[in-house]
Image (cartoon, rainbow, N blue to C red):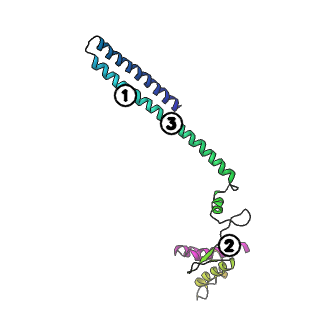
Amino acid sequence: MKAILFALTLGVIIIFSAICSLTGAGIMIHDLIVPGPNFMMGFNIFCLSTILFFVTITSYIVTKVLTTSELMADVLTSLVENELAKSQKNSNPIQTMLNNMGFSGPGSGTSVQIARIEKDGTVTPITDDNIIKKRDEILNQFFGAKPGKKDIKDMTLEELQEEEKVAVSAQNFELAAAIRDVMKNKNSNS
C-alpha cells in the first residue's frame, strides 16, 4: 500500500512539474515574441519546475532500483537457503556446526574428544578413566583424610549440595562439577 501511494504521489508531482515547466516555457516564448514584463517570471517557473521534474524522476528511478534489488535479494536468499537445506543432512544447526568443525562422532551423533595438550605440543586424548581419576583427585584433595571432615561417599545429598554451594562461591568450579557428578551418581543409585 505504501509503495502504491508513493508511486501515485511521485506521478502527480511529475505531471505537475511537467505542466509548470511547459507553462514557464510558454510564458518565456510569449514574452520573446511579444515583448512583455513576464519573461523572468516564466524563466523562474521553468527552471524550478524542471528541477522538480528531474528530482522526482530520479527519486522514482532510485526507488524502483532499490525495490527491485530488495526483491532480488529476497529471491536469492531463499534460493541459497533452499540449497543449503538440501545439502545439509542435519536440521540441528549446532550439530552441523560441530560436524563442519571436525567434531563429528560415529553414527549420526556428535561427540567432542577431550584431550590434554602437553608442553611439547602433543595432544593426549583423555579417556573416561582419566576423567574419573582426575575427579577423584580433586575430591580427595578437598575431602580426603582431613580431621573433622566426612568422607565424600558418606555425605548425604543435602550435605553435598551445601558443599557444592561453598565450592561455587569460592569459584572452585572443578570441585563443584566433581561434587555434582557424585550427587548424580548417588541419585542414580538410589
The local crowd at label 3, few if under 14, some if 14 to 19, many if 20 or more residues have their Cα within 10 Å, is few
Q: Position of residue 9 (x, y in %)?
A: 46, 27
If you read the primary sequence from the N terminus, does the residue marked by circle 2 or circle 1 appear first?
A: 1
Image point (65%, 81%), residue name? 133
Seen as rendered, the residue at the extreme front is: 33
Image point (60%, 83%), residue name? 143
Q: Which residue is mark 3?
A: 65
Q: Position of residue 47 (x, y in %)?
A: 34, 25
- Kindly state the secondary structure of the residue where label 2 is placed: helix
- Kindly state the secondary structure of the residue where label 3 is placed: helix
Gap between marks 3 and 2, in whole Å?
Answer: 62 Å
What's the mark number on residue 51?
Answer: 1
What's the mark number on residue 95?
Answer: none
Image point (67%, 81%), residue name? 153
Q: Are marks 3 and 1 in contact (CB under 8 Å)?
A: no
Image point (49%, 26%), residue name? 8
Give the residue type at disc 3. Answer: Val
Gap between marks 2 and 1, in whole Å?
Answer: 79 Å
Gap between marks 3 and 1, in whole Å?
Answer: 21 Å
What's the mark number on residue 184?
Answer: 2
